[in-house]
Image (cartoon, helix red, strand yellow):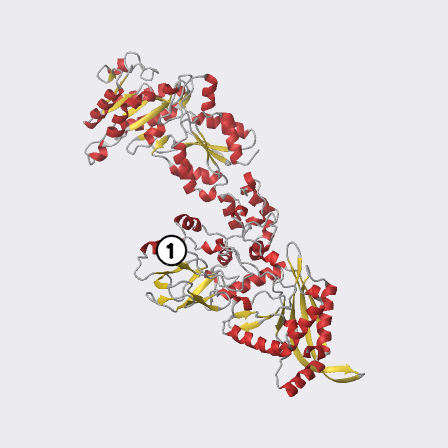
Amino acid sequence: MAQILDMPQLSDTMKIGVLQKWRKNEGDKVSPGEVLAEVETDKAVMDFEAFDEGVLLKRLIADGASVPVGTPIAIIGKAGEDVAKLVEEAKARASGGGAKAAAKAPEPAKPAPAAKPAPAPANGQAAAAAKPAPAPAPRRAPAAAPAVQAAPAPAAGTKVLASPLARRLATDLGIDLRNVQGTGPGGRIVERDVKAAADGGGVNGAAATDWHAAEEAPQTSAPRVSSAAPLPAQIVPDRRTEARPAAAVPAEDIVKPLSMMRRTIAERLLAAKTTVPHFYLTADIDMDAAMEFREQVAQVHGAKLSVNDLVLKACALALRKIPEANASFTEDAIIQHARVDIGMAVAIEDGLITPVIRDADKKTIGQIGAEARELAGRARDRKLRPDEYTHATFSVSNLGMMGIRDFAAIINPPEGAILAVGTVRKEPVVKDGKIVIGQRMSVTLSCDHRVIDGALGAKLLQAIVAILEKPISLAF
Amino acid sequence: MPRTVAFREALNEAMVEEMEKDDRIFLMGEEVGHYDGAYKVSKGMLKKFGEKRVIDTPIAEGGFVGVGIGAAMVGLRPIIELMTWNFSFVAADQLINNAAKIRQMSGGQFTLPVVFRGPGGSAHMLAAQHSQSTEALWAHVPGLKVVMPANPKDAKGLLKSAIRDDNPVVFIEGEVLYADQGEIPDGEYTIPLGVAEVKRPGTDITIIGWSKMVKIALAAAEALAAEGIEAEVVDPRTIRPLDEELLVQSVSKTKRCLILEEGWPFNGVGAEIAYRIGRRCFDDLDAPVERITGADMPMPYNHHLEQQCIPDVPRAVAAAKKLLYIE
């Protein structure tokens, strides 16, 4: 029987997919594993593969179309099947917000994208799907904390109860209803509750934390009173966009609609910077020995290592040494990660991405270097799989190659810290009572104070400095 | 100078004034002539207009309602009095199949300028067969206009408009309202059909009621005002055509809506109004539209049980407070 294929959720944070290019024509036979289309997610261009044998009977969207996850995009079935009814159903669903995917529990633990389209829903389900359900963006859960990852998507029972008027007022006033205590029957939020929230400065808990809350909610195993279902994700950016009327933009300015990557960067970094209490520790590292070490490796092994490779390895070893700093904050507990998975920020066209070197503490510096280059190459081609850029426990951001002396990076939640690496600079230093030319590198560690206190952060930074200044341990 | 008259006198004035102007108008019904009307609405009219224009009929609603329809079809403008609307059911075929449909089925060749009027609703201990609100039945039928005045001024102005209307009008007079006194303007005036009226302005909740429920609504509003709640009472006056705009305007302002209806709940007029309010005011509502209706059962004879079946002030006040989320 013919069935509708939906826009799959190909990454944890994917909410909208762009169908870049169909690879099959209507009428083409497809077999499991064959690529139907290329889909651009918020992070990468990925292949959308067929899961069933059949014929691509109908394409419902064109090349270049951008649709929310769960929106019908194609009909697959036996040759010659009548698809008129399914097309109708797909249209109805698409116009209803295409939120079917939202009903699926996110599965952040699974590296493989859960792309298998569910069979066409029965009418009742289709009707239910007409209401835009929350599309929870599952936050990257720490790899070592399966219990936390297994937190279910918000159940229907936890939805925000609010009168239509309260909802409208909340939208007008920019108040997040999840932060409002309802006083009506069954906790229904009514007009007076929204007004009270507005009067009582409830606005501060509103717009600024929307994204964070939307991402937090699915991960919280014991839901807070206020952390009911997240709003439909699309609603929030709409409200923000409305706040900046396009008409106010001068004619000569270039208006670039947000790409999915920019949207994701905006929401994630805003959430990180506004909700994670950052503090910063900066140290100067004497890089003479490390640069010498790098030279020797090149001479002896013929292998070219970058400063970044040294830093990655040093961080991995330091995190192994100070495991308390290899940790994430959650609502209920601090998760100290068993593995050391280090993300490295890679600048790519129109944004950045953070591929992850898994078990970096167990890999040789040569392995790390090779893997880093390979991942960065594929990152620039936007060919990374979601499991290759999610679930790091710590990150490194390096702008040294661009001559930056020092800077402070924004933590990539739920990681506990990130190291910002500056350039290796030659400068006069005092060594053995004499002024000589030395090599120095400034690094700044940004820490989530909920997980890493000042002294712990300092210990981690101290360890990183010590390893780079006595680089012999990098060789093992 | 406004004059104070009783509800029944206002109706009488409306008929007399119109009949004086237009000799095509006549009144027909049980006891309308020599007895001056079962409720004395037609008092003095036989004497004034004679037996040709004020006609006593046998107890045969199916007959004289039909005669009225026929007379209207051939150019007269009858007023047909039903002793009460409880007796209209034997004439239901005439009202539904003829009065409501002939204008449309004849392609407009016939107009039906006929008014069917008489008392409706419960009075006091008249039991199940004589204590019924029939507006929902008639308003259900496309082709009939349904008018339900709440006070003498509205009664006179609306009845005059009903008599002048070229369509069949069901005019239901609250049986317990006949003795109510009220001011009416001096001289000629009419009130158009299909125009509601705010009977009491307010800001916190809209209470919609018609006929004698307006009195309950106003009394409830007074009780609420004592607690600092300003209820707006809106009287549609005409059930069909319904002045949806004014109702919507009011509820959009107050955000809450309570409907008082003497009739049964299922498929009631209140159900239709609630639907329209829900559709038009959805984003304005802070609570679901609430109804207080007559009990969903035949009216008991027993006085205490009867009182339990009719919407009253305490229940209206309680419902209003519930809509305002006040314990």
Q: Is residue B140 visible?
A: yes
Residue A325 appears in which quarter of the rendering? bottom right
Residue B30 appears in which quarter of the rendering? top left
- The residue closer to the viewer here, A209 or B181, is A209
Residue A28 percent location from the top left of the image: 34, 67
Position of residue B185 in the picture relative to residue A287 (left or right): left
- The residue closer to the viewer here, A224 or B164, is A224
Q: Is residue B6 visible?
A: no
Residue A355 appears in which quarter of the rendering? bottom right
Residue B185 percent location from the top left of the image: 38, 25
Q: Amino acid at mark 1?
A: Ala
Question: Does residue B152 lie above or below A148 as drawn?
Answer: above
Q: Residues within 10 Å of mark 1 (few under 14, many from 20)?
A: many
Residue B9 percent location from the top left of the image: 36, 18
- The residue closer to the viewer here, B112 or B316, is B316
Q: How many marks?
A: 1
- Chain ID, mark 1: A
Residue A107 percent location from the top left of the image: 53, 59
Instruction: Name the image quarter holding the N terminus of chain A.
Output: bottom left
Residue depicted at 47% across the width and 22% down the height? B308
What residue is pinned by disc 1? Answer: A90
Label 1's element?
A: helix
Instruction: Name the image quarter holding the C terminus of chain A.
Output: bottom right
